Amino acid sequence: MATTTDIYARVIGQAEPVERLRAAAASPVHAYLLIGTPGSGSAAAALGFAAQLLSAEQEGVREQRSIDLALAGKHPDLVIVEAEGASLRVSDAEFIITTASTSPVEGRRKVILIHRVDVIEEEAVGKLLKIIEEPPASSIFIALAGELTPELTTIASRCVNVEFSPLSVLAIENQLAVEGVEPGRAQLAASASGGDLDRARLLATDDAIANRAELWRSLPSVLNGSGHAAYDYTQRLRAAMDEAAEPLERRHAAEMEELDQRAAELGERGLGRARIVARHKRELRKLRTDEIRFGLATLSRAYRDRLIQGSDPAAIAALDRIQFSANEIIRNPNEALFLQALLLEISG
């Protein structure tokens, strides 16, 4: 059970933004934008800030109950909005407007926590901007963004911006060690996490991470320029990624089982099943993208090791192609075609 002193305990290495949020809770304004890459702690900090806001002016058991419910994302006056698709749409903005306009259930405040506002569609910006500019007195908005995009500029200008820096490999490694992860595994998980603590925790439970790293590292020596080899190793890489997804899929299955139990007790209304299913799809897609990024970084190190031994034009060309591929991932390419094209290019 959380207490008022450890309300931000799940946020590491972010002392400055956490202190800004702690101070802001004493006299909050209507909207905040927390900017930080996934796993930086911004999402956990948002829940901590919501817990502060919703437990204000409460004491004892009532205060503790509000904190615990908010940190679990289950407080009746905390509304968490997550896009069902790849972006926040007009329908999501309309849901936010409708929700913000209703009265709080328990206290005098309602907190609306909006995930991934940096992927908002252009048509939805105006609607969301209007409710943030003219918010109901009882509603406070906390928006989360991975980066400050041009589309987000007008919304950001109406919010207090709080920035979260990417976590270092050392900070993640130390946190995993605190959580009881064996040192060698903590170092490998941290280095493969891309600065994402949540991903590092998932990787720390993954017994096959070393095998996947070795598979990527072996590619320069096993690819022979043939389409057959590129296809074969694409299939191997995708099978390894399927294995990497198993811990996340087990967690998703447990969440759905819990949801089914709640539906049996309370009925489906208000459970947000569609949004949970959409979140699961996003998390799985992100995991596979993160796996490719990890693989590309591992592959780059293998080619750099070759360059240390002497001049190698083929290694230089491969590194250029890997960098190009890393930049292309954001376009959500077809996974199989993306990998096969890459392997053909670097083996030529």
Image (spheres, grey):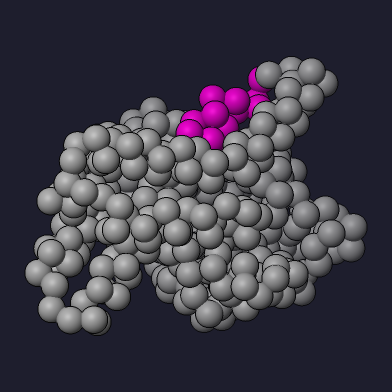
Image coordinates for residue 223, horizontal then vertical, percent: 25, 50
Q: Closer to the camera, 133 or 231? A: 231
In this image, 125 relative to 214: left or right?
left
User: Residue pushed farthest right?
Assistant: 61
Q: Closer to the camera, 245 or 85? A: 245
* Among the 4 quarters of the image, the one containing residue 6: bottom right
Q: Is residue 186 magenta?
A: no
Q: Main secondary structure of the magenta part?
A: helix
Q: Closer to the camera, 297 or 310? A: 310
Residue 304 to residue 201: above or below? below
Q: Closer to the camera, 191 or 88? A: 191
Q: Residue at x 54, y 25 (%)?
A: 274
Q: Is residue 279 magenta?
A: yes
* Among the 4 quarters of the image, the one containing residue 131: top left
Image coordinates for residue 157, horizontal then vertical, percent: 30, 62
Image coordinates for residue 204, horizontal then vertical, percent: 62, 60
Q: Residue at x 16, y 57 (%)?
A: 321
Can residue 163 be seen here? The reply is yes
* Among the 4 quarters of the image, the one containing residue 265: top right
Q: Residue at x 37, y 61 (%)?
A: 217
Q: Quadrant of the N terminus?
A: bottom right
What residue span does the magenta drawing correspond to?
269-284
In this image, 102 relative to 97: left or right?
right
Q: Residue at x 48, y 43 (%)?
A: 240
In this image, 21 relative to 301: left or right?
right
Residue 297 to residue 340: above or below? below
